[in-house]
Image: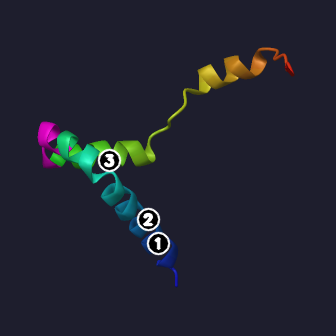
Amino acid sequence: MKGYHYLMRIGRTINVLAQYSESLVQIFIEKGVRDFISFVRETLTGPWLDINWVRGRLKQTYQLRLI
């Protein structure tokens, strides 16, 4: 049961890749096998938001308007 969580995550990743396979075929053709694997790995492990951008947005004051 130790590796069950990881196996479930791998399975979910494969399902998502299968769902978007039409879009990924073009990327696969352009980049090749190794670059495609690197692309998927960077997408899954890389930070999606820049921390400085998030901090700047949190410092701004917001105004809620109900129309």
Part of the protein shown in magenta: 28-33
- The image shows a total of numbered marks equal to 3
Q: Which amino acid does label 3 sit on?
A: Val
Dot 2 or dot 3: first in sequence order is: 2
Identify which residue is drawn at 69% across, 19% down.
57
Identify which residue is drawn at 74% across, 22% down.
58
| Residue 30 is one of the magenta-drawn residues | yes
Within 10 Å of the Cα at label 2, are there few (<14), some (14-19), or many (20+) other Cα atoms? few
Rendered image quadrant of residue 7: bottom left
Task: Evaluate if marks 1 and 2 touch, with contact meaning CB atoms under 8 Å apart.
Answer: yes
Q: What residue is disc 3 on?
A: 40
Q: What residue is disc 1 on?
A: 8
Dot 3 or dot 1: first in sequence order is: 1
Determine the secondary structure under disc 2: helix
| Residue 29 is one of the magenta-drawn residues | yes
Report the predominant secondary structure element of the magenta stretch.
Answer: helix
Q: Residue furthest front?
A: 67
Identify which residue is drawn at 12% across, 42% down.
29
Q: What residue is disc 2 on?
A: 12
How far apart marks 1 and 2 lie (CA) works out to 6 Å
How far apart marks 2 and 3 lie (CA) works out to 14 Å
Q: In the image, residue 53 lies at what x, y percent?
A: 61, 20
Q: In the image, residue 26 lies at what x, y percent?
A: 19, 41
Within 10 Å of the Cα at label 3, are there few (<14), some (14-19), or many (20+) other Cα atoms? some
From what the image shows, is residue 18 above or below residue 57?
below
Quarter of the image that includes the C terminus: top right
Which of labels 2 and 3 is toward the front? 2
Q: Which amino acid does label 1 sit on?
A: Met
- Residue 38's disc is none
Identify which residue is drawn at 29% across, 42% down.
39
Determine the secondary structure under disc 1: helix
Q: In the image, residue 63 lies at what x, y percent?
A: 84, 16
